[in-house]
Every structure is written in C-alpha cells, then in structure tokens.
Image (spheres, rainbow, N blue to C red):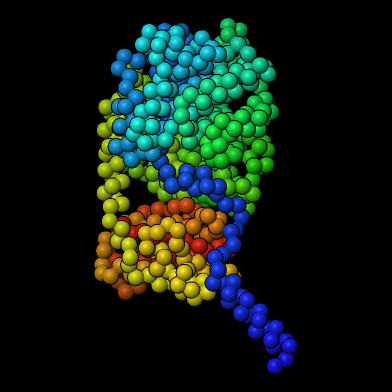
Amino acid sequence: MSKLFLLILAFTALCTFAQKTAPFPVGPVPTERQLAWHEMEQYAFVHFTTNTFTDKEWGYGDESELVFNPTAFKAEQWVKTLKAAGLKALILTCKHHDGFCLWPSKYTEHSVKNSLYMNGKGDIVKEVSAACQKYELKFGVYLSPWDRNHTSYGTAEYLDYYRNQLTELFTNYGPVFEMWFDGANGGDGYYGGKREKRNINASTYYQWPVTLGLVREMQAGVLFFSDAGPDIRWCGNESGYAGATNWCTISVDTLYAGKSGIEKLLNSGDENGNKWIPAEVDVSIRPGWFYHAREDTMVRTAENLFDIYLRSVGRGSNLLLNIPPDRRGLFNEVDSISLMQWKKLLDDAFSVNLAFKSTVIATTHRGNSPEFSAKNLVDGNKETYWATDDNTKTAAIEIDLGNKKNVKYIIIQEYIKLGQRVKSFSMEVWNTNKWQLVANETTIGYKRIIKIDPVCTEKIRIQITDSKACPVISNIEVY
Ligand code: FUL
C-alpha cells in the first residue's frame, strides 16, 4: 500500500470519527443564564406609581407623595393572577421617570414613606417580591435611570444616588432575575424644584459598565436588559412583535453607533453579530403603560394577545406583557378576564402534540449515528438533537403522523447551545397526493411557531434550505 493511500485512509477515518461527535458551536452562544431566560418565554411587566393616580404616562416629578394611595393593594392578587395566566415572572417599576419610589428608600423623600399608603409604613417592593417568592414567580426590577424629581439629575452626584438605590433593591428584596434599564429620556422635569430641561449624553453619562459591575457583584445571576443588552436587547418597538427574521446575535458596536434608525436592526438582530443578545418584546395589555379608567374598554382581547404571543415567543423572543394595576392597587377585572381567556386559547391550541414519538425520517443525519438521528426531534427531550454532517447545510425532515390529523401549528426549535444556524426553511403538508407549501421562512432560533391554514394531513415535510453551518434541531411539535 502506498503511503499516500494510507494517508487518505487515515484522513477519511478521522473525518468519519469527527462527524460522529457533536458539531462545534457556531458564532456566539447563550450563557447559562440566557438559556434559562429563553425557557421562561413569557412574563409580566407591572407599571405602578403616582401616574396611576394622576392619570399620566410620564409624571413630571413634582407630584405630591400623598397622591399615591392604593386602597386595596394586594400583591398576592397580582401574583396569583399572573401565575394562573401562565406567566413566569414579574418585573416591577420600582421607580419610573417621575422618581417616586415604591419602597421606602433612605436616599429620597419622594417615596411611599411619605404617602398615605399604610400611613407611610408600606413597602410595595417588599410585598411584591415576597409574594413572588411565595408563589414561585421570578422577580425583576425596573429602576428608571431618568429621574425627573431628583435635584442632582444630570450631574455625577446622581450616579451615586442611582447606584445607592440599586444597592437597596439588590440587597433587601431577594433574588432579581432581570434588571430593566429604560433608555427613555424627555429632558425636562421638576428636578428638585429647578423646573428645567436637562440634557445628558445617554451613551456616556450613566457609566453603565461601573453600575452593571456593581450590581453583578451583589447578584451574579441577574440579566441586564437595555436597548444594547448586554444580556437582553429591546425588540425595537412597543407594539408586540419580534422580527419574522430574528437573530439572537447582534454586534454591540452597531447598537451603540447612531441611535436613530436602530429599531429595525434591534427587531431582526444580525446574522453575523458578535454577541448573543436575544430580543425581548415589551408590550402593554392597554394603550398606556399605566392604568387609566378611560382605557377600560380598550384592553387587548385574548385573540389579540394570542397573536402577540405568536409574533414574540413564536419568533424566538420572550414576551414581557404589561398589566397595570388600577387605583385600588389591583389588576382590573377587565384585564384579568382577558388574561384568563388568553391562557385558555394557549392551552387549547397547544394541548396535544401530534408529533410526539411519531415516525420521523431525514434525508441525512450526522455520521449516520443514532446519536443524531431524526428520532431525537420528537422524543420530548430538549437535550437530544438531529444534526447533519459539517458540510451539509440543507436537508429534509419528514414527519409521519400515522393517520390524517387536523394541523394548525408547527413548532420547531434549534439546539441553541451550539448557536443559531438556520437561515431559511420551508414547510409542506401532504395534501391530495402531493406536497403543498404552507410556509417559507427564514430564522428558527430558540423557538419558531408557524401558524398554517388548518389542514387535515398525515405527513409534514420541513426542508432546511440554508444554514450558517450544519443544522442542529432539537425539537418539532405539531398541533
Ligand atoms: C418606555 C417608557 O418611557 C414608558 O413609560 C414605559 O416604561 C416603557 C416600558 O418604556 O421607554
């Protein structure tokens, strides 16, 4: 045998062996914290402050503390309602732009301690975080960087104030899963009586790296949300949708460069982005973020919330749904009813997975190894996956449901621990003896839910038509 022949033989053997091992990650991958975040999928935002009582969306910062007076506040009512609606966490506006604090901060007089609520002895943050712990909902903090009340806003001194408040929130109220940094700033305010406009340079003033470092020291597990991450990015709109093309990757440089017009990029992410920063879709159940009685007739219907779910969770993002308590300090009946009806729609739509343990074949699988076979797509185990050989970027998967079933939704998930890969895919259903195209889409990511015109079929075919590297898919469900 010639040396060259032996060399070729050894090389082929090596390649075959390589294909039998797991694919290497491609591009940025999520951290453990981000992975756990993806799995939460949906949680609540709660906007509550003096605005609830003054009928405003952006308080000026000069509201008397005495206006804050919820007459029947019960944190458990919020938490039980959210839990029943299938939401996994609650992010509370501990301080909105008006600067009023829902906890008795020792660094300001503009807080619950000077309100009528419990004669100034109350602590809304304490009650809400405790109720979350009791009912096993995660708790998150919104602390507006822009403070229209504080006299030192715009100077270096304010940064100490802001950081002191973060210290109070991150040391006295248990674990915080997400910290929401709001980029909004309208300039003018009361500012301790100065009543002027204060402009800051948003990209340098707050010195975020220092603040984030401080918070991480107190709670290593927290995820930071802001327009630019570093853990979770804004989806670029407040209307309730992630991009139909939605990459969890994006380059932070691009995010910081020229803020205006960045919304489109935030909405779709960037295939070649150098960081894993998935999008979160924040949207309110009402037109406003705060409660206004006049909006009682404008609460989103269950059907509308279901559509939002499909355009957020169904596009690989998480949904942050705002439910603002009313002046009693309770979720209004109208909102609660809508939430419960929405939950029922979700339960009905996704109750029986027709693909579970069904027969699945693929045109190819990695190294011909059972470890990467198409069976893994329907085994209900998120840690197993189907993959192809490294140089195979297209493939077809066929799911045989056994006999004809009514199909309306097809769910597909990438094994994102190895990166987001798929650039385009299509879905077909077997209809009157031929394949009928029902979807032609781009990205998959953590989860993609495709709604199709209801069809009675026994077979579904999914074609991966382009991918950054070999596709790695962990799950397919059919409803
Ligand atoms: C915006 C704020 O200005 C709104 O009041 C609200 O809090 C929303 C979630 O973020 O930037």
Q: Is residue 453 left or right of residue 66?
A: left
Q: Residue at x 59, y 16 (%)?
A: 188
Q: Residue at x 48, y 57 (%)?
A: 414
Residue 55 visible within the image: no
Q: Quadrant of the C terminus?
A: bottom left
Q: Residue at x 42, y 44 (%)?
A: 41
Above or below for 314 versus 404: above
Q: Quadrant of residue 289?
A: top left
Viewer-nearest residue: 289 or 96: 96
User: Which residue is at the far bottom?
Assistant: 1
* Residue 393 picture location, percent across and down: 55, 67
* Residue 198 picture location, percent across and down: 64, 16
* Residue 270 picture location, percent across and down: 59, 49
Q: Is residue 454 left or right of residue 264?
A: left
Numbered circles on residues, count: 0
Above or below for 330 versus 314: above
Residue 319 visible within the image: yes
Q: Quadrant of the N terminus?
A: bottom right
Above or below for 270 versus 323: below
Q: Residue at x 33, y 63 (%)?
A: 355
Above or below for 71 versus 402: above
User: Which residue is at the far right?
Assistant: 3
* Residue 315 picture location, percent across and down: 45, 49
Q: Quadrant of residue 70?
A: top left
